[in-house]
Amino acid sequence: MKPFEILGRNFNEIEDTLNHSGIDGVFDELEEDEEQEYSVSAEDGSWEISLGEGDVIEAIFLYNPDTFKDTLEFDSSSPLSVIEKLYGQISRNGQQTYDEFLGEIGAWERFDNTKYSLHIEHNFNSPRIKTVTIMLPEVAP
C-alpha cells in the first residue's frame, strides 16, 4: 500500500490492490443523531483505513511504521530531526499523558500541509514511533 497515493480516493477504486478484511462499522451501538463510521483493516493488522462519506479514504493509520519505511522515508527509530527535514516544521504537538479510559498515551507531533496532515505518536516514555496517521487536512482534529 502507498498511503500518500490512496488518501482522498474512493475505496472502491483501490480495494482490489489491498490485502484487507472488508469494510467494518466502527461503532457497535450508535447514540442518537450519531452516524456510523466505517473502516478497513489489513489482514495482518499493520494498517487501518478510515472511510468518510462516499467511501472516501480520509485517514490511514500505520501501526508498524517500519513496514512503510520506503514510503515514509523514516522508521520507528528515526529522530525527530530527520522527520522535520522531510515534512517541515511541527504544526502541533503534545506531551505524553495518562487517560483514565485510554491509558498511557505517548507524546505526539503533527505536520500539516495542503495535501495531508501527518501525525506521529510515540511509545509511552520513549522516543520510538508507535503509530503514524496520514489524514486529509479537513478531518485533522
Image (spheres, helix red, strand yellow):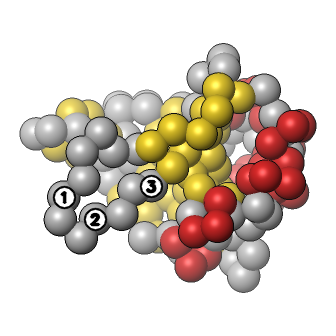
- Residue 37 is labelled as 3
Q: Amino acid at mark 3?
A: Glu
- Residue drawn at x 33%, y 45% is 27
Task: State yes or no: discs 3 and 2 in contact (Cβ < 8 Å).
Answer: no
- 67 with respect to 50 (left or right): right
Give the percent coordinates (x, y) of residue 80.
Answer: 62, 50
Residue that mark 2 sits on: 34
Q: Amino acid at mark 2?
A: Glu
Give the percent coordinates (x, y) of residue 102.
Answer: 23, 38
Q: Secondary structure at mark 1?
A: loop
- 35 with respect to 53 (left or right): left
Q: Secondary structure at mark 2?
A: loop
Give the percent coordinates (x, y) of residue 73.
Answer: 83, 44
Up-down: is 66 above or below 40? above
- 27 with respect to 98 (left or right): right
The quarter of the displayed image where residue 85 is located = bottom right
Whether residue 88 is visible, yes or no, is no
Q: Residues within 10 Å of mark 3 (few under 14, many from 20)?
A: some
> Which mark is first along the chain, 1 or 3?
1
Quarter the N terminus occupies: top right
Task: State yes or no: discs 1 and 2 in contact (Cβ < 8 Å).
Answer: yes
- Residue 31 is labelled as 1
- Residue drawn at x 43%, y 70% is 141
The quarter of the displayed image where residue 136 is located = bottom right
Q: Amino acid at mark 1?
A: Glu
Q: Secondary structure at mark 3?
A: loop
Give the percent coordinates (x, y) of residue 31.
Answer: 18, 58
Up-down: is 13 above or below 70? below
Structural distance between the alpha carbons of marks 1 and 2: 5 Å
